[in-house]
Amino acid sequence: MQKIKHNIIIIDNLNKALAQIEEYFVKEGYSVSTFYSGKDAIKKSLEINPQILILNLDLPDTDGISVCKELRKNDDLSDLIIICVGEHSANYIQMLVYESGADDYIVWPTQSELLKMRHKFLLRRRKKELLDNVSERVSVFSNLVIDKKKRLVIINNINKPFSKKEFDLLVLLSSKPEVVFPRDKIFKQIWSNSYVKNDRTIDVHIRKIREKIGENFIVTVKGVGYKFSNN
């Protein structure tokens, strides 16, 4: 049995050429759903969260630009690749398409091979974007995972509760492993808008962090400050 690669939705207006595209994607192992109504396609997109949507601008119940705008309002579909096709070659039409949030616009009719190549290119680009976003959002150090977006700290697959300042301090130190952060720089970065009662505040937070993730990650540099080590 052939493995399904991606969910694809094709929003069509009974265009025979797009029917050939559907046949191609099915043969390639994609799960394809075809709709002739923009409203039905929006509803289905929210249900199955497809990876790719091929959108004909000319639809019986609405226009493709409106469909694209509606889909882009939903954060759950932020990774959706939208390829619009249409017979309009005017620059202002293409500008409207891209402004609505589409990833690509192909003037129809065209060779089906172009659409195939474009969708593969967009998949590669989106995969790279996702990997880049993950690397910026999540830091992994041995058995320690720091998710900056979700503000999670996981050690040995166990989620550890962190206060805001504890988390911000850990993120600061881990942002530059093996680099020593002087105490005054830590104060400026973490407590710039707060009143700190005494010089022991940093030490207290470091102690609490060590209690949660272990003693090895944060090293004290006497007379200077602290550094993060992954050794």
Image (cartoon, grey):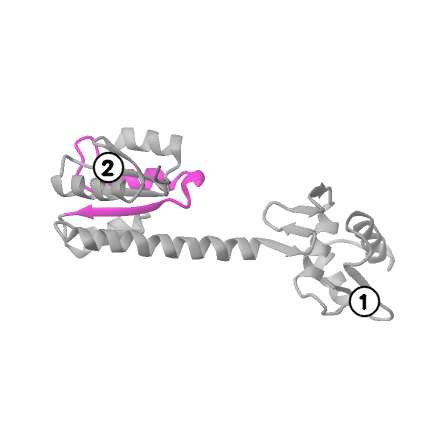
Judged from the image, the secondary structure of the residue bearing numbered disc 1 is: strand
Neighbour tally class for label 1: few under 14, some 14-19, many 20 plus, Cα within 10 Å: some
Judge from the rendering whether residue 87 lies leftward or rightward of residue 136; answer left or right.
left
Amino acid marked by disc 2: Ile
Magenta span includes 51: no
The front one of 62 and 188 is 62
**Which span of residues is magenta-colored?**
57-86
Judge from the rendering whether residue 210 lies leftward or rightward of residue 79; answer left or right.
right
Please tell me whether residue 100 is drawn above or below residue 199 in the rendered image: above
Question: Of the residues under marks 2 and 1, which one precedes in the sequence?
Answer: 2
Please tell me whether residue 223 is drawn above or below residue 45 in the rendered image: below
Q: Residue at x 81, y 63 (%)?
A: 219
| Residue 6: x %, y % from top left | 36, 42
Q: CA distance from mark 2 to mark 1?
A: 59 Å
- Disc 2 vs disc 1: which is toward the camera? 2
Name the quadrant of the N terminus: top left
Judged from the image, the secondary structure of the residue bearing numbered disc 2 is: strand
| Residue 4: x %, y % from top left | 36, 39
**Residue 65 appears in the rendering:** no
Q: Residue at x 34, y 29 (%)?
A: 43
Residue position marked by numbered label 1 in the rendering: 225
**Residue 174 appears in the rendering:** yes
Residue position marked by numbered label 2 in the rendering: 11
